[in-house]
């Protein structure tokens, strides 16, 4: 089966595992998915991630984070730029998610970074997803 949008697949798997209170979720790995998982870990939305070597393809396993009494750390994930409609933002138009409480993941010429890091670096790029 061919996958058209691996980023949307990753976000959907994380969203579904989070709503079912699963401890981990795994998916096929790629460099961009690893960068998105790195940002999610740096921002405190997940505990961590591991890349497991596999024969046809490596697997990315994400360990989800929960608070007291299984309260969810991730309240929402939304894919913004899709393969059929790319959404770009210049350095002056970078989005703020929930007034700065959430995080926008931006793919720039300097790599994948958060909206705050892109503002500091003074670069714009493709708005991949929102997480809050």
Image (cartoon, grey):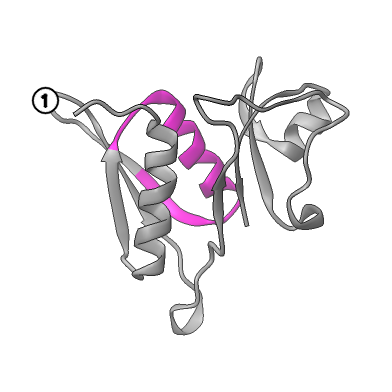
Q: Is residue 114 left or right of residue 116?
A: left
Residue 112: x and y, percent? 59, 27
Q: Is residue 55 left or right of residue 132?
A: left
Q: Report the residue marked by disc 1.
A: 55
Magenta-tinted stretch: 28-49
> What residue is at 31 percent from the left and 31 percent from the top?
29
User: Image height check: is 83 above or below 95?
Assistant: above
Residue 39 versus residue 19: which sits nearer the camera?
19
Q: Residue 11 colored magenta?
A: no
Q: Is residue 81 left or right of residue 19?
A: right
Residue 31: x and y, percent? 41, 24
Residue 50: x and y, percent? 32, 42
Q: Residue 31 colored magenta?
A: yes
User: Image height check: is 23 above or below 46?
Assistant: below
Quarter of the image that includes the C terminus: bottom right
SS of the residue at dot 1? loop
> What residue is at 66 percent from the left and 15 percent from the top?
109
- Extreme-left residue of the structure: 55
Residue 16 versus residue 111: which sits nearer the camera?
16
């Amino acid at each position: 089966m061919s996958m058209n949008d691996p980023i949307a697949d990753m976000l959907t798997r994380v969203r579904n595992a989070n709503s079912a209170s699963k401890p981990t979720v795994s998916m096929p790995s790629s460099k961009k998915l690893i960068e998105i998982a790195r940002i999610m870990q740096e921002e405190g939305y997940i505990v961590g991630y591991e890349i497991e070597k596999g024969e046809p393809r490596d697997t990315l396993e994400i360990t989800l984070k929960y608070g007291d009494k299984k309260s969810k750390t991730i309240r929402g994930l939304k894919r913004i730029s899709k393969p059929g409609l790319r959404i770009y933002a210049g350095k002056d138009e970078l989005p703020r998610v929930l007034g700065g409480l959430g995080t926008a993941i931006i793919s720039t010429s300097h790599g994948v970074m958060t909206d705050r890091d892109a503002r500091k670096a003074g670069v714009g790029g493709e708005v991949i997803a929102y997480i809050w």
